Amino acid sequence: MDSNNTLWKRKYVFAMMLSTLCMMCSCCNERDKEILWKFKEGVTDPSGLLSSWKQEQDCCQWKGVRCHNITARVIHLSLQCDYYDPVELVEHDNYYLQKCLTGDINLSLLDMEYLQSLDLRFNDFATISSDSTVNSSTLNYIDLSYNKYLSIKSLQWLSRIPSLEYIDLSHIDLHMETNWLHFVTVLPSLVELHLDGCNLESISPSLGYANFSASLQVIALSGNSFYSEMPKWIFNLSSHVHQIDLSSNYFMGQLPNTLPNLHSLISLQLHDNYLNGSIPDWIGQLHYLTTFEIDNNHFSGFFPTNLGNLSSLDTLTAHRNLFTGVVSERNFAKLKNLKFLSLVLPYITFDFDPLWIPPFQLDKLYIGPLHPTLPQWLYTQTSLYSLIIENSEFLLEAADNNKKFWRFTSTIQHLDFDNNTIEGDLSEVVLNSSIIELTSNNFKGGLPRLSSNVVFFQLYNSSLSGSISHLLCHSKKSNNKLQYLDISDNNLSGGLTDCWMNWKSLVYVNLGGNNLSGSIPPSMALLSNLTSLHLHENNLSGDISSSSLQYCRSLSILNVRENSFSGNIPKWMPQSIRILQLRSNKFIGTMSPQLFSLSQLHFLNLSHNRLTGTIPKEIGNMKQLESLDLSKNELTGEIPESMSSLSFLNNLNLSFNNLRGQIPSGTQLQSFSELSYIGNADLCGPPLPKNCSNHGDDTKASGENDDDDDGDESDFLSCLYMGLGVGFASGFCGVCGAIFFGRKCRHAYFRFLYDLRDRFYVLLLTNLNSFH
């Protein structure tokens, strides 16, 4: 008992001493703190990421700083952007800018002698510098990825960190670094190298061997600018390499015929290049291969049957190549682990035994062309959450086949049929998938019905007819989830129906390019979440200024061009409006100054109407305006001086009105061509060739003493205006009517226009992927 007590006391004393030692060492090293503070002083921190970094505090307590439990030396620095969201990053390139750290990455951070990892990804650093000779013996992990405006001229400093095991510089500009391969091959402990999207151009394709570390397992070089043959050294890497990603480059040529030393390869990604020739037989001998992606190349020959021996294969994507011949069950004989299969191959014939039952259960299938019937094994895939069929032609004429097929699809979360001829009637079908994209098909009959589970529904350019009430008025439920509705460019007719109260979740609605008629129904007032409404190119009429749309206070985009709406331009536009397209209707009256107090407006098109009066001077309040089209109206008076302050304006059309006087001076309005102003006989001043008199008269006086030169000039201008007028009228209707903005505006317009669609699409796919 005494011995036990003694032992316990010794342990207690030792623990107390250890605790005291830890307390003595709790404050971080002064040298480390000095280096971190110097780093902070060199950056801008708009989001307050470094707000806890205060001189009076222990730097081991600073956000992103991790110290050793005993020595209190800084071992990890992790300051990745708090605002990073993978969904937002996909949709908006600039989403995270001005919210994260900006400025300079000072490599003196690596002077912290015990630092093991440095993570500064997803920030907005612009430069990298060093006040010291980088020479670290402890750093094994460095991630500077997704600092997309960061440009690094040389990677020589990496070669002075021999302890590095993991490097990720993805989406940093390295186009000036031509010797990158040398600087990474001299690292004796390198395990993973990620240089995706770095604008690299040199890869030494003729080099036979690259002396990488024997421990190298991952090399990712996707999304660069390698215009060359496939580098020889890639296929002579260590047998320990698990993952090779050379996708989305400009590699040409063929794969080697002999088996490379890559027996442990798990993932080989070669998609989106210009590779050709046949797939070599050695691919079928990579028994550990789980991912093989060769889509969007020029591979030809027979689709290899020995791929069917890769029992570990999880992902096989080969769509959009030039393979020929027949694909049958022999190509998939032993693929028991296959989850993702992508085979849209235009020159392939699919010939499956109707009794064949695959050894796999797919999560995602992307296939085509299929004809004249669907492969029967498709109905055995009970785990599918995504089915994409393209360029196919199959019949669903028989009622039983039609019901069987759509009943099968009701369990699939993401349904995407594009550019098919599916001869089946949709009008008796109830669709149940969360994401439905049925575009450019050859369906018959009317619209289908939707269950309350549908969130994203896109069925444009598919030859459907009938009323939209069949789609919208069947459901009396209040729990419908539909947010995105696009049934544009069909042959739909009748009114807009008054059943919108059942679809209050709608955010985006596109009914354009149909034969719809009538006025805006009252129930649209209940769409309080609606941000984007497209009713263009129909036969709609009525007075919008007093319609139910005035209660849709979240509208960002309203597009009703090429209809028969009448009355005054509405005054109720919400503050959220960004794009307003009212062209080619029957609007009359003057433009209210109230309209030009929606200061966030980017695009305004009121052309081809019957508007009268002057352009209100309040138009100068629209500081964000990028495109303005008031052409083909009956506007009078002078162009307001305030328009010269619209600094973002890059598309202007005031042609064919009755405007007069001098075009306001200033670089903005003079920067447009005379086509922006023609058809206004009493306008003068640059960029028009007609000079304004010193007395401010709108036209030049004429009389008996006018010399021949003046007469010639007058005749010349008359001919010029006539020629320009005829040319502009036909050109504007034929060309500008199709694109209606300049290139920059058009691109910006469509980026904005499809923003909501992309948002829902990415969000839903992300949620579905995480769910599965």
Image: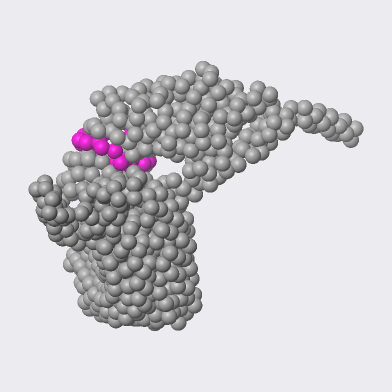
Q: In this rendering, does residue 489 appear at all?
A: yes
The colour scheme is one colour
Per the image, is 268 magenta? yes
Q: Measured from the top left, where is residue 604 in percent x and y?
A: 35, 60
Residue at x-position 40% and y-position 71%:
570
Task: Place residue 138 in its image quadrant.
Answer: top right
Question: Image quarter for residue 431?
Answer: bottom left
**Where residue 456 sits in the image (x, y, percent)?**
39, 66
> In terms of image quadrants, where is residue 680?
bottom left
The residue range painted magenta reads 247-270
Quarter of the figure that contains the N terminus: top right
Residue under the image location 46 percent in, 51 percent down: 88
**Which quadrant is the C terminus positioned in?**
bottom left
Q: Is residue 500 above or below residue 220?
A: below
Report the magenta stretch's main SS: loop
Q: Extreme right residue here? A: 2
Q: Position of residue 477 (x, y in %)?
A: 47, 79
Image point 43% across, 80% down: which residue? 522
Q: Residue at x 49, y 34 (%)?
A: 125
